Image (tube, rainbow, N blue to C red):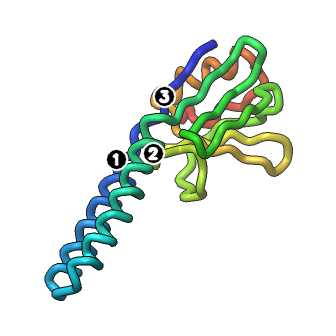
Amino acid sequence: MKTYKSKFGFKIILFLTVLFGGVTMFMYYQNEPTEAIVSFGGISLIVYALSLYLNVSTNYTITEEGVLKVKCGFLYNKNFDISAIKSVAKTNSMMSSPAPSMDRIELTFGKFDVLIISPNDQNAFVKELKKVNPQIENKLIN
């Protein structure tokens, strides 16, 4: 069994920091009531903490039984049959997925099923997948 951590989503965390900080500063300079600023700040802090938690708790495990276990905090915990994977390719998709980083890969299953993930070491991850299923088409190689 081999576990791969997800890449840390610096771009997403930076975006949230700028967004929440900017709105809070705008509210402050617009002389919004203190209660409104504190309420928004509290909600922002919860969303920010959840994003950080999902960044550090997302991992992908390849088992000896040929199963890919994808865990993203308490929100997402699914198993996938590695023998059903057809191909692996880079993607820029912004689709919601268990991939905190924007440096993502797309696993294609069957005819239309897709799983988007962001393992820290993509090449080693694909090599490990190919040990289980040598039929996977690796489109990461340029």
Amino acid marked by disc 1: Phe
Q: Counting residues from the N terminus, which is met first, the one under dot 1 or under dot 3?
A: 3
Residue at which label 3 appears: 5
Q: Give the distance between the C-alpha atoms of the residues marked 1 and 3, in whole angstroms.
A: 15 Å
Q: Residues within 10 Å of mark 3 (few under 14, many from 20)?
A: some
Q: Give the distance between the C-alpha atoms of the residues marked 2 and 1, in whole angstroms.
A: 7 Å
Amino acid marked by disc 3: Lys
Q: Name the residue nearer the viewer: 88 or 47.
A: 47
User: Would you say 14 lies left or right of 121 here?
Assistant: left
Q: Picture coordinates of residue 137 (x, y %)? A: 71, 31
Tag count: 3
Q: Residue furthest front?
A: 35
Q: Counting residues from the N terminus, which is met first, the one under dot 2 or under dot 1?
A: 1
Q: Picture coordinates of residue 112 (x, y %)? A: 81, 51
User: Would you say 10 lies left or right of 34 here?
Assistant: right
From what the image shows, is residue 50 above or below residue 38?
above
Residue drawn at x 39%, y 39% is 8
Amino acid marked by disc 2: Ser
Q: Picture coordinates of residue 108 (x, y %)? A: 73, 42
Q: Name the residue nearer the viewer: 94 or 137.
A: 94
Residues at marks 2 and 1 touching, judged by CB atoms closer than 8 Å: yes
Helix or strand or loop: what does disc 2 sit on?
Answer: loop
Q: Give the distance between the C-alpha atoms of the residues marked 2 and 3, in whole angstroms.
A: 11 Å
Residue at which label 2 appears: 101
Q: Picture coordinates of residue 84 (x, y %)? A: 82, 32
State which quadrant residue 23 falls in.
Answer: bottom left
Q: Quadrant of the N terminus?
A: top right
Residue drawn at x 59%, y 56% is 96
Residue drawn at x 39%, y 56% is 46
Residue 26 visible in image? no
Residues at marks 1 and 3 touching, judged by CB atoms closer than 8 Å: no
Residue at which label 1 appears: 10
